[in-house]
Image: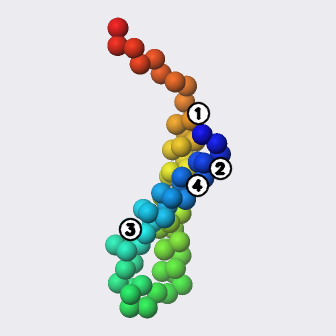
């Protein structure tokens, strides 16, 4: 898997998971139009955390040597 593919995958995960979390955690303020500056920062982190986790786990998975899956 190329570096570009890993980043694209992480962005997709962040958009899906971040949007679900944003709707759950900030949906009322978004719909009411009462978001503040600190709410905006929290909303940004809502997307950055899944992006970071996805990126980290993909890089970690690619760095691990393949395991022997024989069941002798």
Q: Nearer the viewer, residue 29 or 68?
A: 68
Name the residue that disc number 3 marks: 20
- Residue found farthest to the bottom: 33
The Cα atoms of the two marked residues, 4 and 3, are separated by 19 Å
Is disc 2 placed on a helix, strand or loop?
helix
Nearer to us: label 3 or label 2: 2
The image shows residue 32, relative to residue 19, as above or below, that is below
Q: Give the x, y percent position of residue 17.
A: 42, 62
Name the residue that disc number 4 marks: 8
Query: Which numbered circle lies on residue 22?
Result: none
Q: Give the x, y percent position of residue 35.
A: 46, 87
Horizontal relation, residue 28 to residue 55: left or right: left
Q: Residue at x 51, y 59 (%)?
A: 12
The Cα atoms of the two marked residues, 1 and 4, are separated by 18 Å
Residue 10's quadrant in the figure? bottom right
Q: Give the x, y percent position of residue 41.
A: 53, 76
Nearer to us: label 1 or label 4: 4
Position of the N terminus by quadrant: top right
Q: Nearer the viewer, residue 9 or 60?
A: 9
The Cα atoms of the two marked residues, 1 and 3, are separated by 30 Å
Give the mark nearer the N terminus: 4 vs 3. 4
Q: Residue at x 35, y 84 (%)?
A: 28
The Cα atoms of the two marked residues, 3 and 2, are separated by 25 Å
Give the mark nearer the N terminus: 3 vs 2. 2
Name the residue that disc number 1 marks: 63
The Cα atoms of the two marked residues, 1 and 2, are separated by 16 Å
Query: Which numbered circle lies on residue 4?
Result: 2
Viewer can see residue 2: yes
Is disc 4 placed on a helix, strand or loop?
helix
Nearer to us: label 1 or label 2: 2
Labelled pair 2, 4 in contact (Cβ < 8 Å)? yes
- Residue found farthest to the top: 72
């Amino acid at each position: 898997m190329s570096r570009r593919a890993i980043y694209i995958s992480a962005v997709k995960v962040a958009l899906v998971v971040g949007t679900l979390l944003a709707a759950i955690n900030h949906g009322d303020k978004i719909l009411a139009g009462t978001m503040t500056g600190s709410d905006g920062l929290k909303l940004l982190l809502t997307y950055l955390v899944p992006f970071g986790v996805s990126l980290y786990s993909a890089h970690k998975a690619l760095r691990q040597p393949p395991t022997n899956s024989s069941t002798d």
